[in-house]
């Protein structure tokens, strides 16, 4: 290996080709098989590593894509990260992860920073969509794809799940099992999923002619296990449901814990259904029935939308919707398989 940093000149001399040929090969441009082989061998023998910063300035791209999610510890976001990375890696991009929390101001700051040229594009999954955030999204020079719902008229690529339909699947399933006192454990109502999933619950209950009340609806402070445990204990103190639909799997695990503390038998006395169908659903005892909102499919679609946008900046925005499905496990049907 070279004792000092090798340059294009040294690689060219070692390979017996021109500097232009070295540049073409190292930048992935067409070159003859013989020249490509000689340049790559010379670069390896000299330990030459291209300067990524200088190259990005020269070619006008960083070959990096940002994925910004609210909580990198949430299993649904972990699944999304892997799915996005798989798609982008095949196209030669590196994935940069940001955990922005629930505050839109943090997402605005991130967008402003990334618009300075640190990445080539961004996939953003905001929990709260405010007017200031929408203004930043509209004015972004950076190619964007949103995982989630946007108001009509926002000319930005997006992909979303149908959370309302997903909650409807859960309510229908519980009603089919003979449950009539179906409660709802939600996350913060001022978030995009909180609003959509509450609407789905109320619509489904009305459609089935099932009664609901304020006591049967509890809003957790966050979409986490700890918040779900507190909210579930409150719910079980103020009403006597025979089933609970939870707005995500972490909240549902909190509900399982709260039910166990009260000595309730699952699913005989209380059935519980979560949402997102993350890996955690198969790790609980009993295993958790859950609505799959297509996190992996949404993430893959978002990555492909961004790649298409980078290849054709002027094409019309697209807004695909991923349909949900329900996986029934032990928490809502006695004897169900895991």
Image: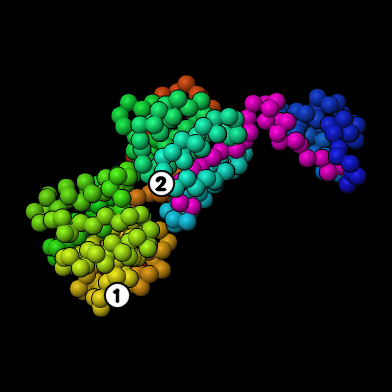
Q: Which numbered mark, 2 or 1, is in the foreground of this view?
A: 2
Residue at 45%, 25% (x, y): give it: 139
Q: Position of residue 216 (x, y in %)?
A: 17, 59
Structure colour scheme: rainbow
Residue 50 painted magenta: yes
Corner quadrant of residue 153:
top left
According to the picture, the residue beneath numbered tag 2 turns out to be: 102
Can residue 189 be seen? yes
Judge whether 205 appears above or below 269 on screen.
Answer: above
Q: Nearer the viewer, residue 49 or 41?
A: 49
Q: Position of residue 108 (x, y in %)?
A: 46, 35
Q: Is residue 299 left or right of residue 3?
A: left
* Disc 2 to disc 1: CB gap under 8 Å: no
Return the residue found at the far bottom. Answer: 263
Q: Position of residue 13 (x, y in %)?
A: 91, 32
According to the picture, the residue beneath numbered tag 1 turns out to be: 260
Magenta part of the chain: 46-72
The crowd level at tag 2 (other Cα within 10 Å; few <14, some 14-19, many 20+) is some
Judge whether 248 appears above or below 25 on screen.
Answer: below
Q: Earlier in the sequence, mark 2 or mark 1?
A: 2
Residue at 41%, 49% (x, y): give it: 295
Q: Nearer the viewer, residue 311 or 36?
A: 311
Q: Position of residue 238 (x, y in %)?
A: 17, 65
Which image quarter is the C terminus in?
Answer: bottom left
Residue at 38%, 49% (x, y): give it: 294
Residue 51 painted magenta: yes
User: Residue 71 — which label?
Assistant: none
Q: Identify the element where label 2 is drawn.
A: loop
Judge whether 234 appears above or below 133 on screen.
Answer: below
Corner quadrant of residue 93:
top right
Can residue 277 be seen? no
């Amino acid at each position: 290996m070279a004792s000092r940093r090798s340059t294009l000149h040294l690689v060219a001399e070692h390979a017996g080709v021109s500097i232009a040929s070295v540049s073409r090969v190292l930048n992935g441009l067409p070159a003859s098989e013989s020249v490509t082989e000689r340049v790559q061998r010379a670069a390896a023998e000299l330990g030459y590593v291209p300067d990524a910063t200088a190259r990005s300035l020269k070619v006008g791209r960083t070959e990096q894509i940002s994925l910004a999610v609210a909580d990198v510890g949430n299993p649904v976001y972990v699944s999304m990260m892997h799915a996005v990375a798989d798609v982008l890696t095949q196209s030669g991009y590196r994935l940069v992860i940001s955990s922005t929390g629930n505050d839109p101001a943090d997402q605005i700051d991130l967008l402003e920073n990334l618009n300075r040229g640190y990445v080539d594009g961004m996939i953003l999954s905001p929990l709260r969509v405010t007017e200031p955030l929408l203004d930043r999204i509209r004015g972004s020079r950076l190619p964007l794809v949103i995982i989630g719902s946007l108001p009509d008229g926002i000319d930005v690529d997006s992909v979303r799940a149908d959370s309302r339909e997903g909650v409807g699947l859960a309510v229908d399933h519980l009603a089919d099992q003979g449950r009539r006192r179906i409660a709802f454990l939600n996350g913060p109502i001022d978030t995009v999923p909180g609003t959509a999933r509450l609407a789905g619950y109320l619509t489904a209950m009305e459609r089935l002619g099932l009664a609901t009340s304020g006591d049967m609806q509890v809003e957790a402070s966050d979409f986490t296990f700890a918040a779900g445990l507190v909210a579930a204990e409150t719910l079980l103190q103020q009403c006597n449901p025979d089933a609970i639909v939870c707005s995500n799997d972490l909240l549902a695990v909190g509900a399982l814990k709260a039910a166990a503390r009260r000595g309730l038998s699952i699913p005989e006395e209380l059935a519980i259904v979560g949402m997102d169908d993350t890996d955690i659903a198969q790790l609980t005892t009993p295993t958790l029935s859950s609505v799959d909102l297509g996190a992996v499919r949404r993430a893959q679609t978002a990555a492909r939308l961004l790649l298409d946008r980078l290849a054709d900046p002027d094409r019309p925005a697209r807004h695909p919707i991923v349909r949900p499905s329900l996986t029934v496990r032990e928490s809502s049907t006695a004897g169900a398989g895991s």
